[in-house]
Amino acid sequence: MAKKRDIEISPHEDGGWQVKRQGAKRASSKHDRKSDADSAARPMARRDKVELVIKGKDGRIQDKDSFGNDPHPPKDKKH
């Protein structure tokens, strides 16, 4: 089975925000507000157990959320 690709929120070339699988040519959906794109992308990432990559207007990564097998999970500090 092929590995599912991560989901990305990024600026759309025609304005607004797009939800797109990494490596895809077309967006899964387009939204006027970044918050609307986030609301659409999170359930997809959770369902597919992939990482959600959120980019800013400049195209740089602002945040990531992992909904699957995180290869680098946070290390809890034991007191």
Image: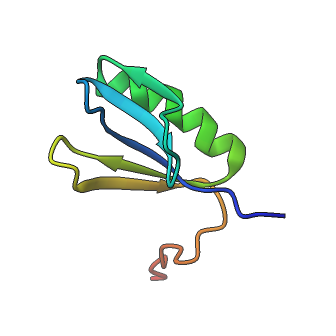
Q: Is residue 62 left or right of residue 31?
A: left
Residue occupying the far right of the picture: 1
- The residue under the point 55% across, 54% down is 6
Q: Residue furthest left?
A: 58
Q: Decide: is 8 above or below 5.
A: above
Measured from the top left, where is residue 77 in percent x and y? Answer: 44, 80
Q: Nearer the viewer, residue 39 or 17?
A: 17
In this rendering, the answer to whether 24 lies above or below 41 is below
Residue 42, image x, y percentages: 53, 37
In this view of the protein, which residue sits in the foreground, 75 or 62? 62
Q: Nearer the viewer, residue 65 or 53?
A: 53
Locate the N terminus and report the quarter of the image it occupies: bottom right
Judge left or right: residue 61 versus residue 45.
left
Horizontally, is 24 left or right of 49 in the view?
left
Identify the residue at horizontal 51%, vertical 55% (top origin): 23
Residue 3 lies, in percent from the top left, at 71, 64
Question: Which quarter of the rendered picture does the C terminus lie within?
Answer: bottom left
Residue 67 position, x and y percent, is: 60, 53
Q: Nearer the viewer, residue 70 or 13?
A: 13
